Image: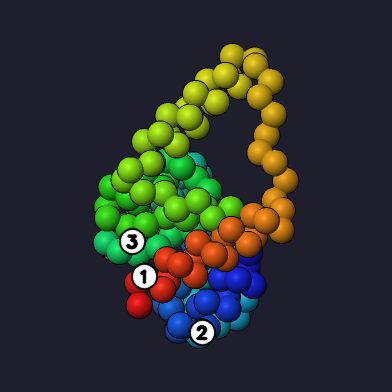
Amino acid sequence: MKPIVLKAIERLKLKTYVVANKKINIGKSIHIEYIIVDQGADEADNHIVELVNEGDLVITADIPLADRLISKGAHAIDHRGELYSEENIKQYLTMRNLMSELRDSGEVTGGPAPFSKKDAEGFANQLNAFLQRRK
């Protein structure tokens, strides 16, 4: 996924922030600013929400973060190519919370399927489609 993102950043000269509580490297680019925040629950999420503007795109698999971003008028896409929107984010949040409750009660729910080539293609297609619409 990182090469796909880096290629789009370079091709379109997109100002990009990579926010995390540890070093995450997606590549070298004059268009990327790496921001490391303090350790702690939701520190990175809170910083991302502070930085985001209406219309911005954030790549995240964190559904509660995606919900916060969408409420600010931003867009969110996950690493498998799911574009979260006002129309679907509450459904994803409800399902995430249900699965969390099941795990907390001792139910074995399994995890997500391993990341596949099909997932990478889905992400690339969704990212490219989003960027084309925003040109």
Residue identifier under label 2: 11
Nearer the observer: mark 3 or 1; the answer is 1
Between 133 and 26, the residue placed more toward the observer is: 133
Distance from Cα at disc 2 to Cα at disc 1: 15 Å
Q: Is residue 61 above or below residue 23?
A: above
The residue sitting at 61% across, 22% down in the picture is 103
Q: Is 75 on the left or on the right of 61, as rendered?
A: left
Residue farthest to the top, as pictured: 105
Nearer the observer: mark 3 or 2; the answer is 2
Residue identifier under label 1: 133
Compare marks 3 and 1 and give the one earlier in the sequence: 3
Can the viewer see residue 12? yes
Compare marks 3 and 2 and give the one earlier in the sequence: 2
**Figure colour scheme:** rainbow
The residue sitting at 54% across, 65% down in the picture is 125
Distance from Cα at disc 3 to Cα at disc 2: 22 Å
Q: Is residue 82 above or below residue 16?
A: above
The quadrant of the rendering that contains the N terminus is: bottom right
Instruction: Indicate which disc residue 52 carries.
Output: 3
